[in-house]
Image: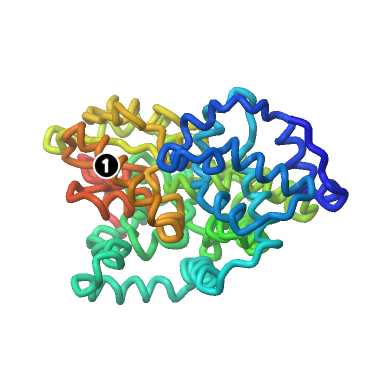
Amino acid sequence: MQTALTPEHAATPDGVEAEAILRKCVHCGFCTATCPTYQLLGDELDGPRGRIYLIKQVLEGHAPTRSTQLHLDRCLTCRNCETTCPSGVQYGNLVEIGRRIVDAEVPRPPGERMLRWALKEGLTSPLFAPAMKAGQLVRGLLPAALKAKVPPSAPASAQRWPQREHPRKVLLLLGCVQPAMMPNINSATARVLDAVGIQTLVAADAGCCGAIRLHGGDHDGALAHMRRNIDAWWPLVSAGGIEAIVMNASGCGVTVKEYGHSLRHDPAYAEKASRVADLTRDLSELLPDIAPALSKKVSTRAALGRIAFHPPCTLQHGQQLRGGVETHLRALGFDVQTAMDEAHLCCGSAGTYSVLQPELAMPLRDRKLGHLAALDPQTIVSANIGCIQHLQSGTATPVRHRVEVLDDVLAERPESG
């Protein structure tokens, strides 16, 4: 694809990267067949190929419009198209560049600006946890739409963090909303790793991975979050002895694994960011190592019945980790199935997408739940808090994190201090 960038764009790092990405695109259209928004809307401009052309036009000097912005907003950034693309087009990076350029030239309506500001500031604020606690106390009185965003109070086990020390150590990113909404995911991760002789450490100053601000148009704010996390982790990383930086939220995982790319132009952080990215592992990537030890400790699984696994887009497309979770859970004796149809498609959560684009997010959720219900599961499991909460809002079947299921069936649990 020939691209003639304006001098203004050609001289910027974003412009140079965008041009390199655009050169790879051969306009084949394979990506259109696996794009969730194109499946719903049938509009070429609401598929990757159409959005690529919109971005190309802007880089070549065409003035973006509110319509351009809307088509880019509708993208889930699920990166299914990257999995499908035979040319290796890095669409996820390209669409973020396009959004930054368009947002700088096309003002948003006041209400939209306020909502986006509230999401990026509120979800990463220290006030989010007490606000969520208050919401849980009055959850039964909330309107249905708001109630769907507030999970029930966490079980008592969420506060039980193992205190044993082990020679093997990992760092865990707690996340921004997970400690307030579903804290049991983090403590269950620590308990499962403790059961197989791995100690989980947490850096107190680490917080949001940066994804909320990055996808919300606040690029500088996202980079600031990334630098803060690197600063929090670096004393432990540089001292050695940390096997991995573990992510149990796949949305965080795909962002942290790209710290090296995001900060490659920052001379003070480029090398550290690359090291952090190299150390980052999704929890599923530890399963091959810990499954033999877990198999000796996991009790009977018969009572769980069939489990339907929804692989988040950030896991199967963003991190290109496909198939491993089901394989290792089955090896441990679980009856785990994935949907026969459209297992590759996004559930519609996509970070803040379900709030910003509910008219698309809800049909995608219901479509996904329909395919999962065909498996007649007793439990649905996933690997990202956003997917879990979004899917749970549309079904009575329990939706849980895969690590919580492992934690529940451990035959032996060490005493916590």
The answer, for residue 226, to whether it is visible in the render is: yes
| 281 relative position to 292: left or right | right
Residue 206: horizontal and vertical position, in percent?
Answer: 54, 61
The answer, for residue 292, to whether it is visible in the render is: no
Query: Which element is circle 1 on?
Result: helix
* Residue under the image location 25 percent in, 47 percent down: 399
Question: With respect to residue 296, does 405 lie above or below?
Answer: below
Work out which quarter of the rendered image holds the N terminus and state it.
top right
| 228 relative position to 169: left or right | right
Work out which quarter of the rendered image holds the C terminus and state it.
bottom left
| 54 relative position to 325: left or right | right
**Three-letter code for the amino acid on which mark 1 is drawn:** Leu
State the residue position of label 1: 369
Residue 416: horizontal and vertical position, in percent?
Answer: 29, 56
Q: Residues within 10 Å of mark 1 (few under 14, many from 20)?
A: many
Question: Of residues 76 and 159, which is closer to you in this image?
Answer: 76
* Residue under the image location 20 percent in, 33 percent down: 374
Residue 349: horizontal and vertical position, in percent?
Answer: 40, 51
